[in-house]
Image (tube, coloured by chain):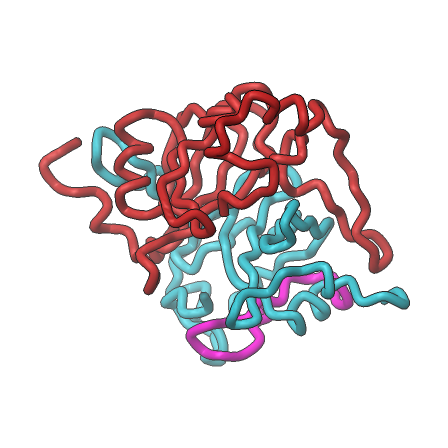
Chain colours: A cyan, B red
Amino acid sequence: MSDTDFTQAVSWNSDGLVPAIAQDFKTGRVLMMAWMSRESLRLTEKEGRAVYWSRSRDKLWRKGESSGHVQQVREIRLDCDGDTLVLVVEQLGGIACHTGRTSCFYQVLENGQWQIRQPVITDPKDIYAKADGAETKKNAEK
Amino acid sequence: MSDTDFTQAVSWNSDGLVPAIAQDFKTGRVLMMAWMSRESLRLTEKEGRAVYWSRSRDKLWRKGESSGHVQQVREIRLDCDGDTLVLVVEQLGGIACHTGRTSCFYQVLENGQWQIRQPVITDPKDIYAKADGAETKKNAEK
């Protein structure tokens, strides 16, 4: 950490959060979008891994804490008006989504219908078999 | 449009909006994040160009309406829990940001400081010289 607090440049919303977009450092694929609090952003910078704020569980969420699918952070970017972050990450296990897919954005609009356009890499049952309940199958982390 | 309304699969927030992440179809670069209403999503699908909902102006915002920096939509993706969109776009003019840069995410965290890591391609004064006021220099569209 430097002398000045870099989190002051962030325009936190009325809940004290901002959206954080995780992008794969190698493929450029957008993996997921989650929320960050000031504390989770500080921890992300300090620990070098993505730490989000779970709105449903109302607590810090170290991505991969039960799945093992940790996001190692290569770069943190802030947008022009300071209210959205991009995390450029290395996605351990190659799976960001609780459905066992690489990316959460697996539904593509085609002729007015959402089509699933990404395979399941690992069955969620196997991902969360040893889960301690901290990260549930349902994408409740958001 | 098909018989079923594809916007029903979207989990709109309490303001009737969802975040929409625009990504360049060629480079994979994340260009910006803005918000969409049900109507703006329908129009985006119908017109093939990004139509957002401006929270500050409380109205539809056809990206590029004054700057000319229209986003032609190649693909619309929805995430696992239906509350975030990705638009894969061709960014006309190569500039998504009101500051005249390719992407809004031009600030990179380095040693606890935000550093500007993208050049200005066109001076905003020139971009908005002929603006009709519908899209202002300040990124008020969000």
A25 vs B129, nearest the viewer: B129
Q: In this view, does B4 lie to the left or right of A74?
A: left
Residue A17 image point, x, y percent: 56, 67
**Residues in magenta, as a range:** A45-65
Q: In the figure, residue A105 lies in which quadrant?
A: top left
Q: Is residue A15 magenta?
A: no
Q: Please, which residue is most extreme toward the left here?
A: B3
- Quadrant of the rendered image containing residue B30: top right
Q: Position of residue A103 (x, y in %)?
A: 47, 47
Query: Going 32% across and 40% down the picture, which residue do you hit?
Result: B40
Residue A137 position, x and y percent, is 39, 68
Asked whether A142 or B128 is in front, the reply is B128
Q: Is residue A135 above or below residue A6?
A: below
Residue at 17 percent across and 31 percent down: it is: B1
**Residue drawn at point x = 24 percent, y = 51 percent:** B9
| Quarter of the N terminus of chain A within the rendering | bottom right
Residue B55 at least partly seen: yes
Up-down: is A64 above or below B44? Answer: below
Q: Which residue is drawn at the image coordinates 38% and 35% (left, top)?
A: B51
Question: How many circles with numbers are drawn on the protein?
Answer: 0
**Height in image: A11 above or below A61?**
above
Q: Give the quadrant of the C terminus of chain A.
A: bottom left
As drawn, A54 above or below B73: below
Residue B30 versus residue B64: which sits nearer the camera?
B64
Q: Nearer the viewer, residue B45 or A60?
A: B45
Q: Is residue A90 visible?
A: no
Where is residue B83? Give x, y as percent.
37, 55
Q: Which residue lies furthest to the right in this view?
A: A3
Q: Does the magenta stretch include residue A53?
A: yes
